[in-house]
């Protein structure tokens, strides 16, 4: 479980996050949604320690993270897997080397164990034939899948996805969403997804937090979000003609 | 800076990265250093020959002056300035691109000390390989002078060699090596710093690569002055 308690973040005089209180549970897909500039990326960066909150605390299974020493943070981070918006694959390494990287860095697996684990992870994301390719040689959807394979290589307890469907076609987006949900249920990970894709919201939103101008103004799930009465949430959910048509 | 010198992860990784950087920063620079040293040595010898026309100055002075110019300044300082352009911009743009494409964030999230993983092997490889490049440049510089004498006939090669060996001070080689080590640290650390703290996109990566070269070059010239004052006077 990840607990975010009274989190504030300011850049200079600009307040980005204001008193965020959230709990993300294991085995569930937790979505952070909101318009661009609402603060959801900053919230995710604070959660994984890439930004330091101005105030507040983040607990990973009860262990304080925000004010922990660098060593303690590094130790918690070894339990975190993250899939970045652009994949953030190491472009000097092949797909296989990318997935093997955390295993080689933090485990003492033999060469055959390593190969087995890499094959397992790449098969898990339906990429059994891409081992020798470099990130520049594969499509955006494949990059995301390799990033997921790398993120799950060490069996993380906590999985973060930053805009997993950005730049992908609707069909590939569905594949990625399905993967996220399957992995979450299979490994009982605490999965946090930062998105503004309504398809994802309706497909995989077990727990949803809506952020507006740095505040959480609504929480619920994929069934209740279409019934939300808060104007900002309704504007977001029914922003596209398709959504208006479906839920008319 | 402090994190750069902390253990980045497993030793095996450091070794792998170290040898990769040795190849990229050192072996990859051999060609350009060799060509420049050979030609500069030849040019220095020709210019010496053209300017020493006083019959009271022995012709062997050409070899002596070429050696002193190459050993004291060219092979350490000028080669360092060339490396600042070639290696410095490459380090800054490589690390900068990793920063803007979130590859450094990915390392951090995995629990890897990204500064130690990316920068330490570059600094150590550079500290090891730069003195070797300097020694190579010294040899090729004076050899270039020898070739110039042989080809142009401005001085017989035995006189050139006599001048080359005249009052040879081994400390001058040590002085040059010390400078090359200091300059290696300056180039890699400044360039890595510039790359590591890039914010923005490809434009900023380009800007920081240029700043890395400019800052490294100025720092090299400044420390050249300090080291010369400390070591030679």
Image: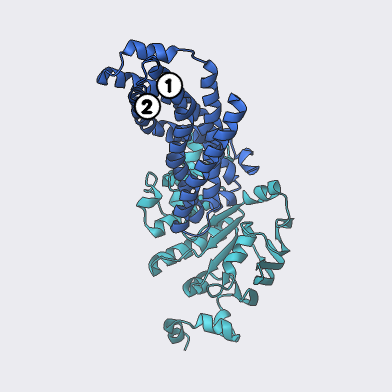
Chain letter corresponding to the colour blue:
B
Q: Earlier in the sequence, mark 2 or mark 1?
A: 2
Asked whether the residues under the numbered discs 2 and 1 touch, taking CB atoms below 8 Å apart as contact, a structural biologist would say yes
Quadrant of the image for the N terminus of chain B?
Answer: top right
Residue at screen point 43% across, 25% down: B70
Q: Does any portion of residue A99 appear in the rendered image?
A: no
User: Closer to the camera, B128 or B167?
Assistant: B167
Residue pictured at 39% horizontal, 18% vertical: B63
Mark 2 → mark 1, Cα distance in angstroms: 8 Å
Q: In the figure, A153 relative to B124: above or below? A: below
The crowding category of the residue bearing disc 1, from other C-alpha atoms within 10 Å (few below 14, some 14 to 19, many at least 20), is some
Q: Is residue B24 left or right of residue A32?
A: left
Chain ID, cyan in image: A
Name the spot of residue A152 as percent of width and height, x first.
53, 52
- The spot of residue A94 in percent (x, y) is 41, 45
Q: Residues within 10 Å of mark 2 (few under 14, many from 20)?
A: many
Residue at the disc numbered 1: B65
Residue labelled with disc 2: B44
Task: Say which quadrant the C terminus of chain B sits in.
Answer: top right
Subunit under mark 1:
B
Q: Residue furthest bottom?
A: A248
Above/below status of B135 relative to A246: above
Residue B226 coordinates in the image, percent (x, y): 60, 34
Chain ID at mark 2: B
* Secondary structure of residue under mark 1: helix
| Element on which disc 2 rests | helix
- Note whether B127 is above or below B4 in the view shown: above
């Amino acid at each position: 479980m990840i607990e975010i308690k009274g989190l504030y973040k300011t850049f200079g005089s600009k307040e980005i996050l204001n008193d965020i209180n959230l709990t993300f549970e294991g085995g569930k897909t937790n979505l952070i949604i909101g318009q661009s500039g609402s603060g959801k990326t900053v919230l995710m960066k604070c959660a994984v320690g890439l930004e330091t909150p101005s105030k507040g605390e983040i607990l990973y299974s009860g262990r304080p993270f925000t004010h922990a020493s660098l060593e303690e943070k590094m130790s918690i981070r070894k339990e975190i897997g993250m899939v970045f918006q652009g994949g953030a694959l190491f472009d000097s390494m092949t797909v296989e080397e990318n997935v093997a990287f955390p295993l080689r860095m933090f485990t003492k697996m033999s060469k055959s164990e390593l190969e087995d684990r890499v094959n397992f992870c790449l098969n898990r994301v339906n990429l059994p034939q891409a081992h020798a390719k470099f990130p520049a040689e594969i499509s955006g959807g494949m990059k995301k899948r390799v990033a997921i394979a790398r993120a799950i290589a060490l069996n993380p307890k906590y999985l973060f996805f930053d805009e997993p469907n950005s730049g992908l076609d609707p069909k590939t987006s569905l594949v990625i969403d399905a993967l996220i949900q399957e992995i979450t249920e299979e490994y009982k990970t605490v999965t946090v997804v930062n998105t503004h894709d309504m398809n994802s919201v309706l497909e995989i939103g077990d727990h949803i937090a809506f952020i507006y101008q740095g505040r959480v103004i609504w929480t619920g799930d994929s069934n209740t979000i279409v019934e939300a009465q808060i104007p900002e949430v309704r504007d977001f959910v029914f922003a596209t003609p398709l959504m208006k048509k479906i839920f008319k | 800076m402090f994190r750069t010198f902390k253990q980045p992860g497993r030793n095996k990784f450091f070794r792998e990265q170290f040898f990769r950087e040795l190849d990229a920063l050192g072996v990859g620079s051999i060609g350009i250093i060799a060509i420049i040293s050979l030609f500069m040595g030849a040019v220095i010898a020709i210019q010496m020959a053209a300017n020493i026309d006083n019959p009271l100055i022995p012709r062997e002075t050409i070899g002596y002056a070429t050696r002193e110019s190459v050993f004291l300044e060219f092979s350490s300082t000028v080669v360092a300035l060339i490396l600042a352009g070639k290696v410095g911009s490459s380090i800054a743009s490589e690390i900068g691109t990793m920063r803007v494409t979130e590859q450094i964030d990915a390392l951090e999230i995995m629990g890897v000390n990204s500064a130690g993983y990316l920068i330490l092997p570059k600094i150590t490889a550079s500290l090891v390989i730069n003195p070797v490049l300097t020694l190579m440049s010294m040899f090729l510089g004076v050899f270039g002078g020898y070739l110039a004498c042989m080809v142009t006939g401005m001085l017989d090669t035995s006189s050139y060699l006599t001048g080359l060996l005249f009052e040879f001070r081994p400390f001058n080689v040590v002085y040059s090596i010390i400078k090359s080590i200091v300059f290696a640290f300056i180039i890699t650390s400044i360039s890595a710093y510039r790359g590591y703290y890039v914010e923005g996109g490809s434009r900023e990566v380009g800007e920081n690569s240029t700043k890395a070269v400019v800052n490294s070059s100025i720092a090299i010239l400044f420390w050249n002055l300090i080291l010369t004052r400390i070591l030679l006077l």
